[in-house]
């Protein structure tokens, strides 16, 4: 491929960086500051879009910036694979900027300058990741991305937010350290770390032990940001950040940089042939498959909408890694196409969640029955995106899934096709109830959600409905929480073991027997689930029990500002039910516009994938790497 | 102009006498002398660097006596870079001390003596001469630590004196052993004589061990580091910045010279166990230094243990004995000096505004001191190893060198040190930015009016001796009440960071990033030395 020397790739990275300075400089005038953000986003997208034709034609733009360390250049190259990520990041930054304005002003958030500046810095770093032409340059921008996104994760400055920030730093720097180790190994073995489509030739003939170790370190290190299990748990905790952050960064930019790193490793460092010779493709695909299924199962149990979306993200990201692990050309194409497809769909979902939060302060699914009356367009977009996540035709998720299925069967690993089918079913299982209850139910007449409400293993009820007689020490705190229970019941205050369930404020339908795990007892007593906080009216006392439980910051859904202890109602429909709002009146257009744009993008990618430039770009990538035209 | 080499030492020493002599006539001549010396020193070091750049290795025979009989001063790529570093740090500290640090004439005299000692350590090519400068450095440092004026500072200085003297004596013993076996004290000469005696001769090995331990004490490697936390924590901020940047750096540089110019890599080939032991000790120092740093709540102590860890990394780079690792060690030596000086100045400035010295006291300081906090964050992340700053460049080479040398454990330790360093810096950054400041306990004017008046006078007037000296409570000419008792528990906080401190910290942060971006140029300066060492 012949390269065109130009400054445009550097400009694409520098414009957001300059934007950071301009945003900080204009901190006293919020409108100017927001204007700077929009202007920077627009220019960045313009620059990136202008690099598309040359990337497609095989003459990518290159900026040479000198030597970073002896033997390794700092070069930015706008090649097709990088352009995929860069287009997604820059376009969706523009969309998210508008959304952020609506969101931050709607909630009257603090530290908005820091927020917008860190956002711009993050996107600049993401573009650097996209355009980096070797592993070390990618590492530079990868670490800068971590540094730039940390203030966004810890934005709330509450205890939960700080803990989430610390966890985020630990995980992502740990991953970065592994990437560095892998990079050193590659450099030592081959003398180069430059991205070569089809892989660095010397790695094919290198010592297999070293090569496998390098692959494991690189894939593992990038896998932290790609939220592969078991290093995924930073992502649900990072949902404490404001929703635009969760949306763009943790569904689009940060996590996509992780899968992008894995894509670079598989396609441009090792190459599909070397990966399959070394035998590391199948373990990668297996880890991805496990992540897909297990994350979807965990998502079924989440009541907090953002946490459910977080686990959905973890699951969907592994579609991409699965495609990269299966290694057949169609699978590669499907996996890479899922990068923009999932980005549009997940961003829509997060935008909807954020809009719901801003407008109604509702975070839990069990509070959202009938919300379609209040926010019709939002929930319609949510429904459309959910269809795409499940892989139904006409929405983006179908196209990528189609190629993934074909690729799985091509490679002879039909079990992965089965995994994809199961995942589709699970997606329906955790998205459909939200959409259904939004439009077809009301707060008074909503179904129970056994997967969310009831404890694992079922509740201890006798066949005739009475209480099971067990030994009655209520302090029998039994099992230590496993991961699922911990993730479900974060942040609970200390449970007073001597308080027997019978004297609690909330009197649930079923008496929990003493043998139940203390988590379920706590959940029912403290009212962690909305259904327990607003129980039906056969209860004895009329208290809206469990108010004290959510005055603190401990609840996992605390992504609103810390000074909201005056809410004794944690969100949910007003007493008279949701009020109907007409088209365009449900929320500000700053938020509604991006929601519809993202949803429309998801549909456009599904209906006319060839017209949207991503598919052509990805076909070019697959051609360069494998020589196969799809 | 090879005469610049001895002048690097002579000028500070001569000017160190000026405040003492002129102090009879005027107060506050110290600062002028120090400023003049710093500027002249900078000019000299730049000229040395330029000479080295064009001519390569430069040599000077002291007193005209031909080495190896006489004392030789040598400047090559490494020492030239370090001498420029000395000038820069001296200038920065002199500027900073005008506002923040002790202001007595004796302080400036001691500082200049220290400058002379350190410059001497960097340019000497004679082992015994190195001992002389080592002791000069040590004595000046002991005195400077004691200017903290509190009982704790005195104790810290005493501890440093005892431990440091033992270290220097061990070094002297080692030099003595080498002298007995070869008859020469000149570094380059010894490199030729030692193989004739035999690297595995007990005399030589013992000499090496004694020298290494002695210099290890001065570099503060674990477990020889015990003097350092107290010395850094109890000394005034300007002193801590200076000694953290330069004193241990000079000792580590001395170790580099001993390892590569005197003993040469052939020693490692002949007796691998010696340097293997050093590698192990250095790696242990990296880990334990970081762990101890995480346990600290006092900021300066944390930075002291951080130095223990970082110098472990540097010495590990030296002791792995291949070119890449050596380059990494040298780059990290220079980079760490810049970063640590900046960090100490930043911590001092932030602590002065916050009114406390612990990590928790810095909660919410990013609002009150945004520039210094941002620069602190940049420096901290640079030390963690976030590219493109200089910390990454050093670490990359050390790791690569370790991998090339088959030292997997060292490579692993160096890589994990990133996370360990993050562990103790992330807490501070989190406190600065993501916690709310506690309710201010009355940001009042300092009750000590003399100190306040001194501060004002020092900032506004230009050494008007009568003005600030006259506001002394006791008025004795020797004791200047401008010795702000920094080591006291809680000073009344100042309302804003002085501009000088801001400038210095931002300059340090910028330098750390620039050095990292242009690391290849720095490495190019080191290359000739590295190649010669491995011939």
Image (tube, rainbow, N blue to C red):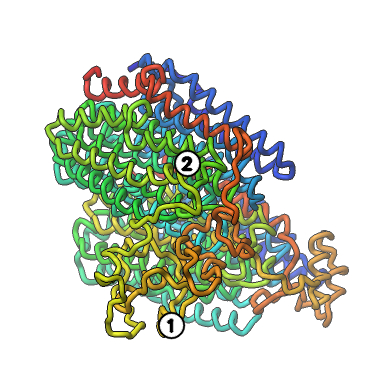
- In this picture, is A3 found above or below A569? above
Q: Residue at x 52, y 70 (%)?
A: A545
Q: Nearer the viewer, residue B511 or B416?
A: B416
Label disc, if present, on residue A439 of the rendered structure: 2
Q: In this view of the protein, which residue sits in the foreground, A222 or A232?
A: A232
- Image location of residue A79, percent across then percent down: 38, 24
What SS does tag 1 mark? loop
Query: Is there any visible trace of residue B307 in the rendered image?
Result: no
- Image quarter where the N terminus of chain A lies is top left
> Which residue is found at the position 22% from the left and 31% from the top?
A405
**Viewer can see residue B319:** yes
Left or right position of A44 against B418: right
Q: Which residue is mark 1?
A: A499
Q: In this rendering, is residue B423 above or below A579?
A: below
Q: Identify the subunit bearing mark 1.
A: A
Q: CA distance from mark 1 to mark 2?
A: 40 Å
**Nearer to me, B12 or A148:** A148
B471, A335: nearer the viewer: A335
Do tags 1 and 2 sit on the same chain?
Answer: yes
Circle 2: element type: helix
Badge 2: chain ID: A
In the image, taking residue B442 as reference, residue B191 lies left or right, namely left
């Amino acid at each position: 491929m012949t390269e065109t020397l130009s400054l445009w790739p550097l400009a694409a990275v520098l414009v957001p960086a300059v934007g950071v300075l301009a945003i900080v400089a204009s901190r006293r005038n919020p409108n100017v500051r927001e204007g700077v953000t929009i202007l920077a986003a627009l220019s960045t997208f313009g620059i990136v879009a202008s690099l598309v034709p040359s990337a497609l034609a095989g003459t990518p733009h290159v900026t040479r910036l000198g030597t970073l360390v002896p033997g390794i250049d700092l070069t930015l190259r706008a090649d097709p694979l990088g352009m995929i990520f860069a287009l997604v990041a820059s376009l969706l930054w523009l969309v998210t900027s508008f959304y952020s304005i609506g969101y931050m002003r709607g909630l009257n958030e603090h530290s908005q300058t820091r927020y917008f500046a860190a956002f711009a810095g993050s996107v600049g770093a993401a573009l650097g990741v996209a355009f980096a032409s070797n592993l070390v340059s990618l590492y530079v921008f990868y670490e800068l991305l971590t540094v730039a996104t940390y203030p966004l994760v810890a934005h709330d400055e509450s205890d939960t937010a700080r803990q989430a920030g610390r966890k985020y730093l630990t995980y992502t720097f740990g991953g970065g350290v592994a990437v560095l180790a892998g990079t050193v190994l590659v450099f030592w073995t081959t003398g180069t770390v430059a991205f070569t489509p089809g892989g660095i030739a010397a790695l094919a003939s290198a010592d297999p032990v070293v090569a496998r170790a390098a692959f494991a370190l690189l894939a593992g290190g990038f896998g932290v940001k790609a939220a592969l299990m078991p290093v995924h748990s930073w992502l649900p905790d990072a949902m404490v950040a404001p929703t635009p952050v969760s949306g763009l960064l943790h569904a689009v930019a940060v996590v996509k940089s992780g899968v992008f790193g894995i894509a670079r490793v598989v396609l441009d460092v090792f190459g599909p042939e070397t990966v399959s010779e070394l035998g590391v493709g199948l373990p990668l695909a297996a880890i991805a498959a496990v992540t897909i299924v297990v994350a979807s199962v965990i998502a079924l149990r989440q009541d907090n909408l953002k946490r459910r979306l977080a686990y959905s993200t973890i699951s969907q990201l592994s579609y991409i890694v699965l495609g990269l692990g299966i290694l057949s050309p169609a699978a590669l194409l499907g996996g890479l196409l899922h990068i923009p497809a999932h980005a549009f769909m997940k961003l829509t979902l997060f935008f909807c969640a954020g809009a719901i939060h801003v407008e109604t302060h509702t975070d839990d699914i069990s509070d959202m029955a009938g919300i379609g009356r209040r926010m019709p367009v939002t929930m319609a977009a949510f429904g459309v995106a959910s269809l795409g996540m499940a892989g139904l035709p006409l929405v983006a998720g179908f196209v990528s899934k189609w190629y993934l299925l074909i690729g799985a069967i091509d490679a002879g690993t039909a079990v992965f096709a089965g995994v994809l089918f199961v995942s589709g079913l699970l997606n329906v299982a955790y998205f459909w109830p939200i959409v259904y209850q939004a439009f077809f139910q009301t707060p008074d007449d909503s179904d129970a959600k056994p997967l969310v409400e009831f404890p694992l293993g079922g509740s201890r009820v006798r066949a005739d409905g009475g209480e099971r007689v067990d030994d009655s020490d209520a302090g029998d705190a039994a099992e230590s929480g496993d991961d699922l229970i911990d993730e479900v019941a974060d942040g609970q205050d200390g449970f007073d073991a001597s308080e027997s369930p019978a004297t609690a404020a909330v009197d649930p339908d079923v008496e929990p027997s003493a043998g139940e795990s203390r988590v379920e007892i706590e959940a029912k007593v403290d009212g962690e689930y909305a259904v327990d906080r607003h129980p039906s009216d056969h209860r004895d006392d009329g208290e809206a029990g469990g108010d004290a439980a959510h005055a603190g910051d401990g609840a996992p859904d605390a992504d609103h500002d810390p000074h909201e202890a005056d809410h004794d109602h944690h969100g949910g429909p007003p007493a008279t039910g949701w009020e109907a709002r007409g088209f365009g009146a449900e929320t500000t257009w700053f938020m509604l516009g991006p929601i519809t744009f993202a949803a429309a993008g998801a549909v456009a990618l599904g209906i006319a994938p060839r017209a949207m430039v991503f598919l052509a770009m990805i076909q070019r990538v697959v051609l360069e790497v494998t020589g196969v035209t799809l | 102009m090879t005469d610049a080499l001895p002048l690097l030492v002579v000028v500070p020493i001569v000017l160190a006498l000026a405040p003492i002599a002129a102090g009879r006539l005027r107060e506050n001549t110290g600062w002028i002398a120090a400023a003049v010396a710093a500027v002249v020193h900078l000019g000299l070091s730049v000229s040395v660097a330029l000479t080295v750049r064009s001519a390569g290795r430069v040599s000077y025979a002291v007193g005209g006596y031909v080495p190896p009989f006489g004392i030789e001063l040598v400047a090559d790529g490494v020492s030239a870079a370090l001498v420029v570093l000395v000038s820069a740090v001296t200038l920065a500290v002199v500027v900073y001390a005008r506002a923040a640090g002790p202001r007595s004439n004796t302080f400036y005299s001691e500082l200049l003596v220290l400058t002379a000692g350190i410059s001497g350590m960097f340019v000497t090519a004679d082992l015994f001469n190195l001992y002389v400068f080592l002791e000069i450095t040590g004595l000046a440092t002991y005195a400077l630590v004691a200017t903290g004026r509190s009982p704790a500072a005195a104790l810290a200085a005493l501890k440093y004196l005892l431990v440091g003297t033992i270290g220097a004596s061990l070094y002297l013993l080692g030099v003595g052993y080498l002298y007995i076996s070869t008859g020469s004290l000149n570094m380059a000469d010894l490199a030729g004589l030692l193989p004739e005696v035999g690297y595995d001769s007990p005399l030589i090995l013992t000499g090496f061990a004694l020298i290494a331990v002695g210099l290890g004490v001065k570099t503060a490697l674990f477990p020889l580091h015990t003097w350092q936390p107290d010395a850094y924590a109890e000394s005034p901020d300007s002193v801590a910045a200076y000694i953290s940047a330069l004193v241990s750096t000079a000792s580590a540089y001395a170790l580099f010279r001993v390892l590569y110019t005197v003993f040469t890599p052939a020693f490692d080939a002949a007796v691998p166990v010696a340097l293997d032991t050093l590698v192990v000790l250095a790696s242990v120092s990296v880990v334990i230094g970081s762990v101890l740093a995480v346990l600290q709540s006092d900021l300066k102590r944390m930075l002291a243990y951080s130095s223990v860890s970082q110098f472990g990394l540097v010495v590990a780079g030296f002791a792995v004995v291949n070119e890449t690792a050596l380059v990494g060690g040298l780059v990290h030596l220079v980079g760490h000096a810049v970063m640590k000086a900046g960090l100490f100045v930043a911590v001092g400035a932030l602590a002065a505004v916050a009114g406390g010295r612990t990590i928790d006291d810095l909660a919410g300081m990013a609002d009150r001191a945004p520039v210094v906090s941002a620069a602190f964050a940049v420096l901290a992340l640079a030390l963690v190893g976030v590219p493109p700053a200089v910390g990454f460049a050093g670490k990359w080479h050390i790791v690569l060198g370790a991998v090339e040398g088959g030292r997997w454990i060292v490579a692993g330790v160096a890589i994990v040190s990133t996370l360990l360093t993050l562990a103790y810096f992330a807490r501070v950054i989190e406190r600065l930015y993501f916690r709310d400041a506690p309710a201010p306990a009355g940001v009042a004017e300092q009750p000590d009016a003399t100190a306040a008046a001194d501060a004002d006078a020092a900032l506004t007037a230009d050494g008007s001796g009568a003005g600030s000296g006259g506001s002394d409570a006791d008025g004795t000419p020797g004791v200047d009440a401008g010795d702000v008792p920094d080591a006291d528990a809680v000073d009344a906080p100042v309302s804003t960071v002085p501009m000088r401190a801001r400038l210095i910290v931002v300059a340090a942060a910028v330098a750390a990033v620039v050095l990292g971006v242009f690391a290849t140029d720095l490495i190019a300066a080191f290359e000739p030395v590295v190649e010669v060492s491995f011939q």
